[in-house]
Amino acid sequence: MARLLQIFGFLSVLFRGATLTFQSLTVGGIVFLILVLRRANPGSDPVREACLRWIRSSSLALAAMQLSYVLANSLILMQSADMTVADVSGANYVIAGAIGIFAALTISILSGAHPSRNYAYLLFPAAVVIASSVLTSHAMARLEFRAPLVAFTALHQAATATWLGGLPYLLIAIRGSQSTDLAQQLCARFSKLALISVCVLASAGFVLGYAYVGSFKAAYGTSYGAMVTTKIILFGVLLLLGALNYQLVHANSASGILSSLRRFGEAEIGIGITVILTAASLTSLPPAADLTNDRVSAVEIFARMAPRTPRLGSPTMQELPEDIYAAQSKAFESGSLATESFVPGQAGTRPNTPAEKAWSEYNHHWAGIIVLCVGLLALLAQAGNVSWARNWPLGFFGLAVFLFLRSDPEVWPLGPNGFWVTMADPEVLMHRIFVVLVIALAIFEWRVQTGRVTTPGVRLVFPLLVAFSGALLLTHSHSLGNIKEEVLAELSHIPIAIFAVVAGWSRWLELRLPSENQTRHLVARLWPACIMLIGVVLLNYREM
Amino acid sequence: MFSVRRRFFAHVLVFAATFSLLAASASAHAVLLESNPSLNAVLSGPDVPIKLRFNVRIDAGRSRLTLLHPDGTTIPLELAKDSPADTLSARADGLVPGAYRLRWQALASDGHITRGEIPFTVARS
């Protein structure tokens, strides 16, 4: 039963993520079509058709994902509370889901039949899609200031979809434009629209942040606050890219800038998705304003983060407590987890023992040494043109083996629990996915660095995987309560995630920007530096 | 042109897949802020009023309170209809002395479920 709930819980998370993706693509596409493409030259017909195709596909995918999400959530509710289909059908999330599915299907039909130059009617179902999403947001569940919070959430989501969801359509338009003039015209229009969207989403975000975080101390002392701060930092990176784009659009009219614009746009989409993911991660947490006890203080953060000698010796397996699964089950039976709120399928947590903490610190510190060396060699290969240093990706093999053996001592090959436990425990599964990612990263990038492959697609695997890993870290499962140790651990993981995202997209830009763009030289140094910084943060990771 | 489009399609698919794989649960879970009885409380019986307050609105029609008795039987409690939006209330009457566990499962109005357990004892009067 618990396993079944875990599986449905995991599926529900996947479907929700996909729903948010396609929601942004659908709404962003419609706004792009109406406000950016509408008044363009007649020569824009192929672009319009391509955009309509994408809107149609996105809205169909949105309906399918929304339906899957409602089904998975309903199965969890029916299984865990002995409810019938009739009992579940009136729940708020079911009604919201049904409205969203209806609106998405309406968009799909309207964007397919009788294409015309007037698409204003698509705005109504697009607004309904946003409304259905807001119905299942924090704002709807609040007790105070519900109406204004709902309004600001709707504005925040609509502006995000217009900007980040519209970006892929800008790239489609640049690619499909038959003339440079048309492409530049579209870029200039989108640039203005993006500027307005950024102002709206930042203003609405400020109000929501004030309502849900409430104080500066909560911004660093709670999981929710730390994630909001991360979102603001990534938003700053996005603004920087946006400013570079804005400058390109308004500085001159050379056709060469379109290529740079496309590349910056790609990086913006990637980082934008990371920001939306951070937002998705945020909404799974109770707002900081609701949890006023047990916040982490600045003194505690400084005490934890103060530099110390790395731990290079590990406790033995015998020093670790018994199998974590058995221990959790016992703790649950004895009622020691009773006040904790947790989702069905989870067994709760217990504080780590000193040996477990030492085990984890040892893991982080050795991983830090490997990553620091990798970053240093990458910088040597880039800046110093040292040929043997180009083998730096091989260092990731060592990291993969180390992670595989050490990250989950209770599971095979070190522990008594078999390999298949990996599939049922989301945390172990995430560690295993990381190992696969690191191996893939080593293979692809070593072949690229040593000139064994020159295919453009293969060269992009490394930046994508690094950025992917950063985003994965940001969505790492969070505790529902204010557990100090977990907040402190999150505070150390957040810089790693941000450096990984910046490293991934810097490398992407280095590979993709045209050679005449001077920013290439800057980003070529930036990504090895970010990898080194990840190593430094890992080396100073502490759990006690 | 076709291959360019296909390649771009592949890129966007990668972004979409990444997003889908990574997104954490996207709706807030209800967290228990205070309860009566409180954790490990020792109460005088036989009638015990029960009140659980959460940080958000609760769908009371789809939430559950059950009481695990000292003899191992589990009795579902009837939820009061007139509770505030963030509260689950019920009464457990005629409790004999012994150790009890109050199990709760709450559906937040945004669609997510949380659960927990509160052990308490009814003392001999």
Image (spheres, rainbow, N blue to C red):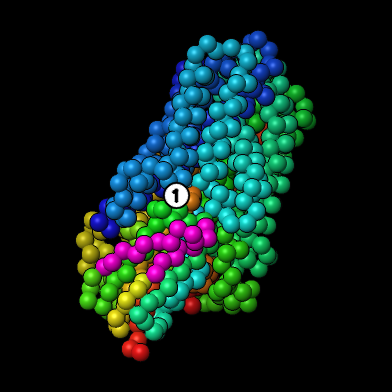
Give residue A335's quadrant in the image: bottom left
Describe residue A313's horizontal placement relative to residue A224 as left or right. Answer: left
Q: Position of residue A389 (x, y in %)?
A: 49, 52
Decide whether residue B86 is among the magenta residues: yes
Of all chains, the one bearing label 1 is B
Q: Identify the residue at image location x=64%, y=38%.
A: A159
Task: Examine the rendering and report whether any part of residue A483 can be seen.
Answer: no
Mark 1 residue element: loop
Q: Position of residue A53 (x, y in %)?
A: 49, 20
Observer-nearest residue: A28 or A427? A28
Q: Is residue B69 above or below residue A493?
A: below
Q: Identify the residue at image location x=55%, y=33%.
A: A128
Q: Position of residue B95 (x, y in %)?
A: 31, 77
Observer-nearest residue: A219 or A421? A219
Q: Identify the residue at image location x=59%, y=27%.
A: A124
Q: Is residue A22 above or below residue A543?
A: above
Q: Which residue is mark 1?
A: B111
Decide whether residue A481 is among the magenta residues: no
Describe residue A495's horizontal placement relative to residue B18 as left or right. Answer: right
The stretch of residues the image draws in magenta is B74-91
Observer-nearest residue: A116 or A140? A140
Describe residue A410's horizontal placement relative to residue A489 as left or right. Answer: left
